[in-house]
Amino acid sequence: MLARLERWASESTRPRAVALLTIALFLLASIAFWPQYLSKSWSSIDRYTHAHAILGTAWLLVLIVQPLLIVRGSRAAHRIIGQTSLLVAVSFVVSGVLLAHFRISRMPDDIYAKEGIYIYLPLAVALLFALAAGMGFHWRHSAAIHARFMVATALLLVDPVLARIMYFYLPPLPDVRMHQGITFAFIAVVLTFLVRSLPPTVQGRRAYRGFCLGTGLTLALFFAVPQTDMWLAFTHWFRALPMT
């Protein structure tokens, strides 16, 4: 069973598989963001949400187009888009931080007292996405590692997609944080097998394993850190910044 899962993980990093899996994530995202975003009029949504959505869509398109260029043997085009995609990744991270600040800074005090602490998740995901994209670019000459870091950027988008689908379309759970328990477990399992499927001698394996361990720890801390006084002090500081 483990061998089959490792083989599946290895095959999922092949160019055609990456493109197909990203297309599936793109379609699921359309369903997930329909109730609160896609079904609304453009003018009723703030510009930070629009910017983050457009850049997130652009990144998913990169993850679809780039593997297909490899399949077609268009390596020159792949390199050109790869250089451009670094700007897309940086802009997506910045837009995520700005959107988080916009939302928390506009929260009424009573809502902030209940929900402000959960700004941890969008900021943590922005950090992890930046690391995955940056390390993927750094290891671009090692196909196995590069592909896994790119897959990791897509995996980090699984929570906002699947958690919304569960929230809007499935029966309610006793605690809304259980949505994250399910999505984080899925991400952790996939990352585990992506590491296990790497040959021990592949250059960059240690870096990818470290990233996966750090990702698992950072996501797990979502269930502990937001309740601490230190994090509450941080949210007060972050909320007061003149960013948006």
Image: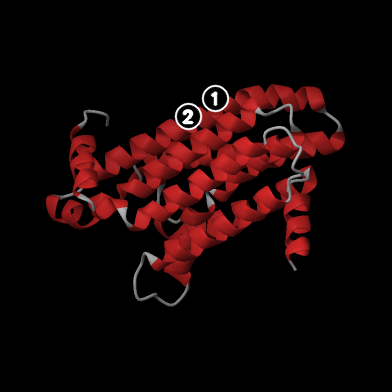
Q: Secondary structure at mark 2?
A: helix
Q: Secondary structure at mark 1?
A: helix
| Residues at marks 2 and 1 touching, judged by CB atoms closer than 8 Å | yes
Disc number for residue 146: none
Amino acid at circle 1: Leu
| 17 on left or right of 208 | right
User: Please, is residue 241 above or below residue 120 in the view?
Assistant: above
Specify the quadrant that holds the N terminus. Answer: bottom right
Q: Residue at x 60, y 35 (%)?
A: 207
Q: Residue at x 21, y 44 (%)?
A: 230
User: Please, is residue 150 above or below residue 33 in the view?
Assistant: above
Q: Could you give the CA–CA distance between mark 2 and mark 1, rounded to whole angstroms?
A: 6 Å
Tell me where residue 154 appears, x and y as whole percent.
59, 46
> Which residue, given by chain and number where applicable, does mark 1 sit on?
87
* Among the 4 quarters of the image, the one containing residue 52: top left
Amino acid at circle 2: Ser
Q: Is residue 77 at least partly visible in the picture?
A: yes
Tell me where residue 140 appears, x and y as whole percent.
69, 28
* Front position in the image: 159 or 234: 234
* Among the 4 quarters of the image, the one containing residue 173: bottom left
> Which residue, given by chain and number where applicable, does mark 2 sit on?
91
